Image (cartoon, grey):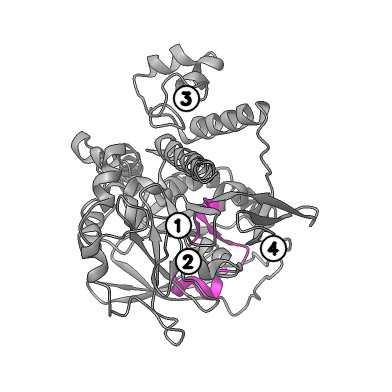
Amino acid sequence: MKDLATLRNPQSPITFLSYLHSQNRLVCFINKGSTIPSRKEYADYLSWAAQYVQNHGIDILYGHEVIALSRGRKTSTINVRCQNLITGDYRVFRARDVIISPGGNAQIPDSLSPISEHPFVIHSSVYATSIDLVLESFRTSSNRPLHIAVIGSGQSAAEVTLDLRDRLSTITSMYNHEIDMIVRKGSLKPSDDSPFVNEIFDPSSTDIWFNLPSEQVRASALKEYRTTNYGVVNPRTLEIMHEIIYNQKLDDDIASRQSSASLTYPRINIRTYSSILSTSVCSSLSLATDRSKTPNVDGPIFSIITQNVVSRTISEVKYDVVICATGYQRSSWINLLKESDFGQDFGLHIGSCSVQLIPVGRHPREADSAELSSRRGSSIFPSIDENHIPVPLYLSRNYQLLPTKLGRLASATSPFESRVYLQGVEEATHGLSDTLLSVIGIRAGEVVDDICRGRVEKVWMTESKL
């Protein structure tokens, strides 16, 4: 039910139930006895909804990247410059208001940076579209057992590990292929999706989160509920994985007792309490900078040195492929804004490295006094010589980024009339549901209402002066 539209309008034509009905699978889905669709089905639902929107007159430009924002000829417009990633052609759109919803970019830990550009190092965000080509290289040039590392302890890491096991079973080898999950924690942890905890994703929780009295309280709440979404695995997935590992041990015991060879199914190993110290490309191989070229696959490609955080034991293992299920960073929009010619209206300059989102109360030009008083005179307000200090950016409850002047909120008569909204990057101010689908329909409605309300107020003020 937490789809693109149901919580905002259950009668919408693009709800998940409408999708099931249109595909003649509604009864079949009900008979499953579960309300949770597979990733495959939900991805198809999103594709179906996107096509519905296109069929009703909304242009969607796939394969385009927004590369610059700039002021229009008037203060009430923004030029959006984008590039077609296939043809290289550029287009410029002029908009009154802009909603920036960039999603997340792959986050690669520093310890993996020496190998991150290699074509056989894949982030989970591109796993589905990249893994076939990588494994095909081994299928055609080697019959040795493969050793693959999956870095991470969350849902993506677990699902990638299970999928790899299925894929490797189709690659012939006299010995077991192996998949190592490298986990810093002592075990894989279950996600908490119990009914009371799930209330943190309710639309009403956004108001509660936004109105928390201080940054410290919000940080504490985020820490309390991290087990709902970060570094955790769905209990059902955990059961599947534990059953596989248990059967591996069972097969080993049977083979040992009967003095026979173990079955050659791909093996899953969970290397707990493992902290990655360093990574490198094996000395006998050169780094492939061109992803269209296949590196030498006669032997392991990567060396990963880890330390057990409990015993302090250091070990080195060599791998053929490395999958990074290491999460996302959501800061690409900062560069887009700071490089624009209106970024300074929000307090950004070209040297700004990071930002700190500050929620602004009910009155769009008045920040919460307690929140601001705790920051005045503190290092949160940077000078030009203090680029390492986060720049304060002010965000309204309805996701509008508010103009500033000298580190303070600008007056209501700011010359920059266009509105800039953020979506999916403001977890610190709007809560855990911000990066998820839980409130996406409600959130979209709030932004549209805010845009329309601003236009109506402007027209009324103009007419009242006549």
Residue at 47% over, 66% down:
346
Q: Which residue is identified by label 2?
A: 346
Q: What is the C-alpha distance between the residues marked 2 and 1?
A: 8 Å
**Mark closer to the chain start, 3 or 4:** 3
Q: What is the C-alpha distance between the residues marked 2 and 3?
A: 36 Å
Checking the image for residue 401, the label placed there is 1
Taking the view exactly as shown, the residue that stands out farthest to the front is 466
Q: Which corner quadrant holds the N terminus?
A: top left
Q: Which corner quadrant holds the C terminus?
A: top right
Give the left or right position of residue 22, taking residue 407 as reference.
Answer: right
Position in image of residue 238 (x %, y %) = 31, 43
Q: Judge the density around disc 3: few (<14), some (14-19), many (≥20) Cα neighbours within 10 Å.
A: many
Task: Tell which tag, 3 or 4, sits nearer the viewer.
Answer: 3
Residue at 69% over, 48% down:
63
Query: What kind of element bears circle 1?
Result: strand
Residue stretch rendered in magenta on the structure: 99-125
Residue at 80% over, 53% down:
87
Q: Can you say whether 347 is above or below 33 in the image? A: below
Task: Tell which tag, 1 or 3, sits nearer the viewer.
Answer: 1
Label 3 amino acid?
Answer: Thr
Residue contact at pointers 3 and 4, CB within 8 angstroms:
no
**Mark closer to the chain start, 2 or 1:** 2
Checking the image for residue 291, the label placed there is 4
**Mark closer to the chain start, 2 or 3:** 3
**Mark closer to the chain start, 1 or 4:** 4
Q: Judge the density around disc 2: few (<14), some (14-19), many (≥20) Cα neighbours within 10 Å.
A: many
Label 2 amino acid?
Answer: Phe
**Residue 131 visible in the current orientation:** yes
Q: What is the C-alpha distance between the residues marked 1 and 3?
A: 29 Å
